[in-house]
Structure formats: structure tokens, C-alpha cells
Amino acid sequence: LLVDLTRVRLTWWTLSDTATSTTLGNPARTRFTPSPRDALLSPSRSRAGAGRKRKREPRLFRFPCFPKVGDHITNMPLFRATSPAPAAAVKPPCALHLLSYDESTQKFELGEDALNALRAIRGPVGVLAVCGRARQGKSFILNQLVASRGGPQTNNSKGFKVSPNVRPCTKGLWIWSEPIPAVTPAGEPYQVILLDTEGIDAYDQTGQYSTQIFSMAVLLSSLFCYNQMGGIDEAALDRLSLVTEMTKHIRVRSTVDGGGDPSELASFSPSFVWLLRDFYLDLNDPEQGGNITAAQYLEHALKSVPGGASVAAKNSIRESIRGLFPERECFYLVRPVTDEKDLRDLDAVDKSKLRPEFKQGLGDLVNLLFQRCRPKQVGNDVLNGPALAGMAKQYVAAINGGAVPAIATAWESVAEAECRRAAEAGEVAYDAAFYPAADASAADEAALSGVHTQAMETARAAFANAAIGGPELRQSASTRLEALLAKRFHEYSAKRKAEASAKCAELLTAASQRVYAAANANDATVEGVVAVVDTEVARYLKGAAGSARHERLAEFLSDMMRFALASLAQRNSQALQSSLEREQQRAEAGHQRAGAAEDRANREEQRANAEELRANAEEQRANAAIASVAEEKETRRGIEGRLADIERAKLEVELAKLEVEGAKREAEEQLRGAESKLAALERAAGSDAASAAAAALATAALS
């Protein structure tokens, strides 16, 4: 249940007693808070049946057993720890029972501790197995391998169990709990698992049991070291008849009838080292030109020898060994000590008591075994710890079911299972990489897609690191993983979009309420409402997320235009209408007043016209008067001019009078003179002519 629930991200919504969540155009919705226990049992049922509401922020529901996937929820009563858990004690390395035989069920069983130790190895793994007859020092060699790579200086209490008595102390298969780091010739690191086997052909074993133990050791190992005392002779070959029997009980594929062909099994078999203990012979063969190597000694012993039916069985064993172990080597060790008592308990013997040539040989053997060991392979595929554990389970299931272990078939099953586990590892890696980053990211599609792409790369790397098997199997599992993660991403994206949409609706609901309040205020103005809308838009853009936030904002602004501003415009229109009506009333009253005023004005105008006529008449009279005055003035001026002329004439008359007076006086004088003259003449002439001339002269003088 916990594993399934970690793949479902739950959002817990709690509200206050009066709080509701509304959206524009939708009725209010209320989310209820489920109890933690009900949520674990049935999230949908608890959400529908809860009745209490509390105000809490939305949060993500995560499990403490998966710290990489999300944060734990220690504040929930179901998961609250009463006290800190004590740190787990680190167990020292030890031997773990991998394979045992249950006499009551007549079945082989695999030890869970050993399987768990194998499953903990995530990288390539190699298996170095030591097999041979009972009571001949196999466990001693393994203990030296452990000690040579930094392990404990083993003895019976710390390493693989060694016993000096005749009773075999190793039953089934045992592995060392701590893998030994190693490096391939190409420089690639891997882990070596040491495998100890029960001695073959012991007195308390059946031939079938020995074959099954031997077969399991060969099938699981990448380096198979066969330990025996003395040189390679016919008796030694007889003891290795298990190889021939093993090839009869192992197949490459389950669909093939009969036993396996050694040459066909060779591609799946381990490298082979034949270890000769307490070897005392000289490696000298005159037929091969003198001194020979241990490898040449082995190859010579594995050559088929001529003969009839008596040697056919031995030659069959030789052929089986050559076919099953194409990569083979031979190594020998001299007797470690001369004291029989020390030999029985060799693990407890002080190193200083060991023969120098044995210590030198032991060191060379350790180096040889680690050099020749390789990561375990099935075909071209390299096994990791979980795959090796899976292969062991497949082989044991086949043996317990009475079937023949099929290497390729078992590998296909294991590879499929490991690809499924690799896909699960990819899911976990995706969850650890995606959800924290996605939760902290914006809810828009571009940001989530970027986080998803990076998380997918992490998931692919985790899958590739754990997946095994052929390209088709890997591709199929990878395709399913990517489809699953794509679906999970789309579900998460849809949920985030829904949450973002709800958040947008919540923000816009609050904004619309504030805008409506501003629009409905008594002193509301269009400019004021627009300013409030601008403020709410800025607040919304700061708090809203998601790809639809702009679309929702556009809807909000459209609603504001249709409702808030329209309401404000309607209120303003009503106010303007009322004002217009009042103005119209005032205008009508003014019109009436204007009519009356106009009548008064008309009357005044008539009076004015009459006054104007009178004024015109007065003006005419005035003008006439003015003209008369002017005329009078002109007349006066004419009169005055005439008077002046008269005065001048008078003056001239006076002057003329004066002149006349003068002339008269002159004339009188002249007259008197003339009269004088006339009298003179008359007296002188005394005649009429003189009188006429005198009269003419007097007349002239008078004129």
C-alpha cells in the first residue's frame, strides 16, 4: 500500500468554517479535510465523508520511508515518532549461507541474508568460487583471499569455517557478506563475491547432490577454482566426472531436449583454475623437452589417450573439461608446514611457521585468482548483484522442480525481472528528481516540461545503470518506463494546472470582490475603478501561475468590463439621467421664466420702440432744433456778417462821407474858388459866354 501510494501525490485541502472557494461563473465549492487514517485506507471515501473543516494551507502528502521521493509528514499522528530511532549497528563481514538443503522437504533453499547481500551490489559483480573434495582446505584459500584485500585476519570465528576433524563443516554454498572491489584489465571497476562450496563426494552425499552443488557453483561463478590434493592422475579425473554429469543436467535453453553440449555451454561457463595442493612433483617432462609450466602440465593431462573402451570414460571426462572450460589455468602449492598438527588447523597457525615457498606461492595464487576473475556474464550481458540473486533463484527453482537448469531461459526470466526493477529504480529516480523541482517550479507548461525532461534523463540513467538483458528487452522495458513516466507527468501537470487554475480563480475571486466593492462605492469613478483593476492585475500576476493565468486574466478583465465598469457606467448613467432630468426641469422653469421675461422684454421692447419713436421724434425735433439752431447760428453768423458788412459799409460810408465831406469841402472850396473865379470872370467879362462857361465849370465841380 505504501509503495502504491508513493506513486500518487495527494493534495490535502482544508478550509475555515466560513471560507469558500469561488470562481467566476461557478458556484462556491468547499473542500473537506480527511483524516490521515481514512486517507490511507480510502482517499476518495474519506474526502467525501469528512465533516469537519479547518483552515490549513495545501500540502503534498509524502511518506517517510521514501526520503528521496518527498518530505516526510512528521506532523501527522499516524507517522509521528515518539523517539528517535537508534542507529542500526554495523555488522562485521561474515560468511552467509547462500544455499542449503532441507532434509524435511527434500528441497534446496536460498538464504535471505545472502540474497540481500547480493541484491545490495548494484554494479557489475564477479563470483570467485572454490570447489573440491571435502577436508582439503578450500575454506582456507577463501580466507586468505578475504585477508589479502583488507578483510579481517580470518580464523574459525571470523571467516569461512574450517575444522580439523573428519566431519565436513561447510554445507551447501556460502558467500562472504562484503564484496571485494576489483578492476578489470580495461580499468572498469566491479565487485568480487567469494563463494565457498560444500566438499564433493563426501561420505554423507549422494552423487546427484554432489552434481547439483557442483553445478550451482559452476553456474554462479565467473572464476571456478577446483581445489585438490596432489597431482592430476586418473583418480583426479574420476572425481571430476561431475563435469560430465553436470553437462547432462544443464541446458542453454529449456526448449532443447537432452543434456547440454559442453562446447555450447562454454560461452556461459566460468574461467577455470585447477589448484593442486601439497604438490611435491617436479614439473619436468622429457617428452616435452624438460621443464614445463603448470598450464602445460594441465593441458597434457587433459589430452585424450589412445585405447579402447577402458579409457573411453576418462577421455569423455577430458573432453567435457576441455569443452566446458575453454579458459583454464593450473597452479600448485607446496605443503604449507611439515608438522601434521599444524596442518590440521592451518588457519590458526602463525604465519611465521609457514614455509617460505608456500607463502610465496599463496601470494601468487591470490594475485592469479583476482587477475583471472571477471564480472559474471551471460552471453554479452554483465550481471549485477540483483541479477545474480535472480539467477540463483531460477536455478534452485528448476532443481527443486525436477527440471534441468536452463541458463539462457533463466537469464531471460531474470533479465525481465531486473528490467522491471530497473524501471522501478527509474521511477524512484524520476520521483526524486522531478517532484521536488516541479513543486518548486512555476506551474506553466514550459517550466514543468523542462523539469520533466531533466528528470527523464535521470530516470534513463538509473534505468540504464540497473537494467540488464538484450537490447530488445531493455528497449521494451525502457519504452514502458517512459510511457509510465509520461503518464505520471501528464497527471501531475494536469493536477498542477488544476491547482494553478484554482489558485487563479481564488485570486480573481478576491480581486473581483474588491473591484466590485470599489465600483459600488458611493464616490466611485471610472478612473478610480480602473486604478483598482490595475492594482489587482499586478497582485494577480505576482501570485498566479500556470499557462492559463493570462487567459483567466483576460476573462477577468472582460468580466470587469462587462460587470464592474458596466455597473459603474450604469450608475453614472443613472446619475446623469437624474441630473439631466433635474436640468431639464430647471431648463423648463427657466424656459417659462424666459418666456415671461421675453413677454416683459417684448413689452419693454414695444415701450422701447415707442420711446425710440419718441426719441426719434425728439431727435428729429432736436435735429430740427439743432438744424434751426445751426441755421439760426448761420443766420446769426450771416446777420453778424451782414452787420459786419454793414458796419464796414457804415465805416466805408462814414469814410465815403468823410471823403464826400472832404470832397464837398474841396468842391465847395473849388466852388468857392470857381465862384470866385466866376465872379471874377463875370466881372472880368461880364458877358453871357462867360456866364455859361462859369455855369459849366460849376456843374463839373459839383459832379
Image: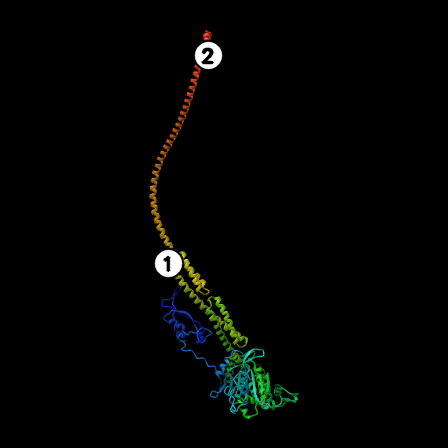
Label 1 or label 2, whichever comes before in sequence order? 1
> In the displayed structure, would residue 322 be above or below residue 6?
below
* Residue 522 spot, x, y in % from top left: 36, 57
Q: Quadrant of the N terminus?
A: bottom left
Label 1 SS? helix
Instruction: Answer few, some or many: residues within 10 Å of disc 2's Cα (few below 14, many 20 plus, some between 14 and 19).
Output: some
- Protein image colouring: rainbow
1 and 2 marks in contact (CB < 8 Å): no
Identify the amino acid type marked 1.
Asn
Q: Which mark is residue 697?
A: 2
Is 640 left or right of 198, judged from the image as shown? left
Q: Which mark is residue 520?
A: 1
Q: Quadrant of the C terminus?
A: top left
Number of marks in the rendered image: 2
* Residue 74 spot, x, y in % from top left: 41, 74
* Residue 56 spot, x, y in % from top left: 39, 69
Residue occupying image coordinates x 46% and y 12%: 697
> In the displayed structure, would residue 672 be above or below residue 25?
above
Q: Is residue 581 visible?
A: yes
